[in-house]
Amino acid sequence: IIMKLNHECVRDLLLYLEDNLSYNKSISINSLTLKSYSQEELIYCAEKLIEANYLICTKADGYQPPLIVARSITYSGHQFLDNIRDNTVWKETQNILSKVTSTSLSFASNIASQVLSNIISKQMGLN
């Protein structure tokens, strides 16, 4: 399993789960096919999203890889997703993040929030 967190995969996974989860429907990350991401990459991203308290999942560790079933996105997960949802904001955020070697999910969220604030300020004529 790769041990590098792919922010693009994180974003795509959250967007997919937001569109496809419901009160009556959970989603097995292990059987998910999403873009060109490997099963291991999706499972690793899901594990990190659980650790960040962005996803509520059922996880069975007795398997390799662990079985993960996504049940819900947390409020914090929705806040993070709201910061990175817009493609323009995401591209600018990725541009900024590419200039530093180490970025956490919370740091990426903070940068996206600042990018979004700057866009809104410009549209309101405040800049």
Image (cartoon, grey):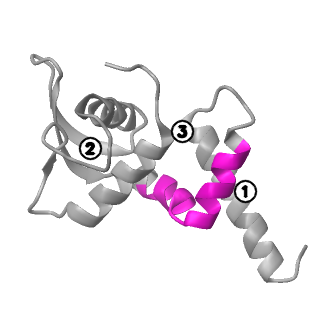
Residue 83 among those drawn in magenta: yes
Q: Position of residue 61 (x, y in %)?
A: 15, 20
**Mark 1 belongs to which amino acid?**
Gln
Mark 2 crowd level (few <14, some 14–19, many ≥20, 10 Å Cα): some
* In this view, the mark in front (1 or 2): 1
Among numbered discs 1 and 2, the one appearing first in the sequence: 2
Residue 4 sits above or below residue 125 on the image:
above
**Position of residue 106 measured from the top left corner of the image (x, y, whole percent):** 58, 40
Give residue 105's mark. 3
Relative side of 99 to 113, left or right: right
Circle 1 Cα neighbour tier, 10 Å, few/some/many (<14 / 14–19 / ≥20): some
Q: Which residues are magenta?
A: 78-96
Q: Which mark is residue 114?
A: 1
Q: Quadrant of the C terminus?
A: bottom right
Outermost right residue: 127
Mark toward the start of the polypeptide (3 vs 1): 3
Q: Are marks 2 and 3 in contact (CB under 8 Å)?
A: no
